[in-house]
Image (spheres, grey):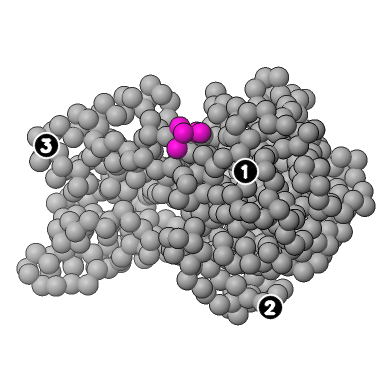
Amino acid sequence: MHPAWVSPFSYAAFSGQGFLAALFAASGDETRTAFAPGSALWSSLVEAQTDYQTQYVALWHGALSRSQGRKIAPVIEPEQGDRRFNGAAWRDNPYFDFLKQNYLLQSRALHRFVDALDIDEAVRQRLRFCARQLTDALSPTNFVATNPDALNVAAMTQGESLLRGMQNLHADLARGKLSITDEAAFAVGVNLATTPGSVIYENDVMQLIQYASITDSVRARPLVIVPPCINKYYVLDLSPHNSFVRYAVEQGNTVFMISWRNIEADGRHLTWDDYIERGVLKAIEIARAVREADEVNTLGYCVGGTMLGTALTVLAARGEQHVGSATLVATMLDFSDTGEIGMFVDEATVSGFEAALAQGGVRAGRDLAAVFAAVRGNDVIWPYVVNNYLLGKAPAAFDILYWNEDYADLPGPWYCWYLRHTYLENNLRQPNAVAVCGQPLDLGRVTIPGYVLATREDHIVPWQTAYRSMQLLDGEHRFVLAASGHVAGILNPPAQNRRSYWSSDTVHEAPDAWFAAATEHVGSWWIDWDAWLARHAGGSVPAPERVGSAQYGAIEDAPGRYVKQRAH
């Protein structure tokens, strides 16, 4: 067997310099100049190549030994959590085992080379990302000829699976995106976002939903939820069995939910200030009025939490004490470490968006979804390429994935403000560095109790970054870390008794020190949060007989029109 046949990746990354030249083409003239024979960068390449070749020889020796019936330990194994090579053929078949190990060796050598470079960290992050995109794409699992499952299914179906795969590919090309779930299986308001309630207010920014109470008494302070506006709010009200909204209502909360509008041309002028004043602050005002409450409890998720934090700072600057507590779920207020998402944001990029959108325009949600998907290619891209095109299967029905595809378009001015003042300049953590709604922002003036929830495997909001909110806000706070990722870690209903979470009554300066002292609990963080929220409920009162009030009557049944509008 010629080594070049072993994998589509083969020797290209190490015996040739074409890939590295392309990799450095995106990293600037200084780096390209430094990459020359005799330089430190060249030495790093030679070291990585030598290590690879040593391991490669060991791999061939092991393959020859296996051919003689001897049992040999693998030279390299997939990383924990890598499900691409779970099939028995990747372990038991010598040919496919060789393909797998050769691919893993080459991938590891390339990543080690990038890590060894003496270059600016921002450049290194881009190189890591590019290297991972390449190695993920060229995995032998992604090609019919080197995927044992695809070959087996093709043989069993006499090629029918490959024909179906081509038909699936043709259909996805026609619709312009990869199918990751059976979209025909879901409809918002039918089997998604079904918790009973009514829209009681709307403007050009949002609709406000009040959910119907199902308990005889309710907590005196209503709960106002601020969801992200990049996707739709119903991530928190998916199917009845995993609806966070339904759970909150069952615990005796009068829940108000913001449903952000999907922006079209007539909303292209809307700003960050509009979303704070006529979105978050308006929702708080209406919830207080409808329930005749002095204060409300609040919850913000992802960028909704960033907007909630901004709104709380505006209220503090105005001297208005209308909020009794704040829950921040997978939220960044300090953007000093934003993970791989941050590498897409630099001065040139932001200035380009500002030139195109800051005075009025629409930022397509589809483009943002593509960025998020690229960061997790082995979870949200390549498994579906294999399933749809190589195996010829139809994607399964999965409510979270349906929601993930139901992104929203955003107003250009809002988007430009968000990029510059959070990801690029990190102004929210600097007292008085920026003003919103006419008020200089100082998160230190927010003194209400807080519950800060992060997820351990979050690729959008690193949990260590979410932890830093504890150091920016004043007052008593509780930090809880849930297992899993940005969405799955949030949607963890108690009835399923899945996953776990970590908590500690002690606050540490460093997040890793907090984790070392934290206790793991099996089950849902929802129970811990509800016990905390109950202490800030303001007592109990009789449940309202109907939603709304004389001033804010029901406009239409939940989930309302806004959430059903699809992005173009």
Q: Main secondary structure of the magenta part?
A: loop
Report the number of discs: 3
Alpha carbon of mark 2 to alpha carbon of mark 3: how far?
A: 59 Å
Mark yes or no: residue 351 visible: no
Alpha carbon of mark 2 to alpha carbon of mark 1: how far?
A: 37 Å
Q: Is residue 458 left or right of residue 464?
A: left
Give the number of the mark in front: 2 or 1. 1
Tell me the quarter of the picture where residue 366 sits: top right
Numbered mark located on residue 157 in the image: 3
520 above or below 411? below
Residue at image point 73% right, 31% down: 553
Q: Tag 1, which secondary structure?
A: loop
Residue 463 spot, x, y in % from top left:
60, 61
Give the number of the mark in front: 2 or 3. 2
Alpha carbon of mark 1 to alpha carbon of mark 3: how far?
A: 52 Å
Q: Residue furthest left?
A: 68
108 above or below 270? below
Residue at image point 80% right, 33% down: 551
245 is within the stretch colored magenta: no
What amino acid type should be assigned to the residue bearing mark 2?
A: Thr
Q: Tag 3, which secondary structure?
A: loop
Question: Bounds of the magenta span?
Answer: 187-191
Numbered mark located on residue 506 in the image: 2
User: Is the C terminus in the top left, top right, bottom left or bottom right quadrant?
Assistant: top right
111 above or below 518? above
188 is within the stretch colored magenta: yes
Residue 126 spot, x, y in % from top left:
55, 48
Residue assigned mark 1? 212
Q: Tag 2, which secondary structure?
A: loop
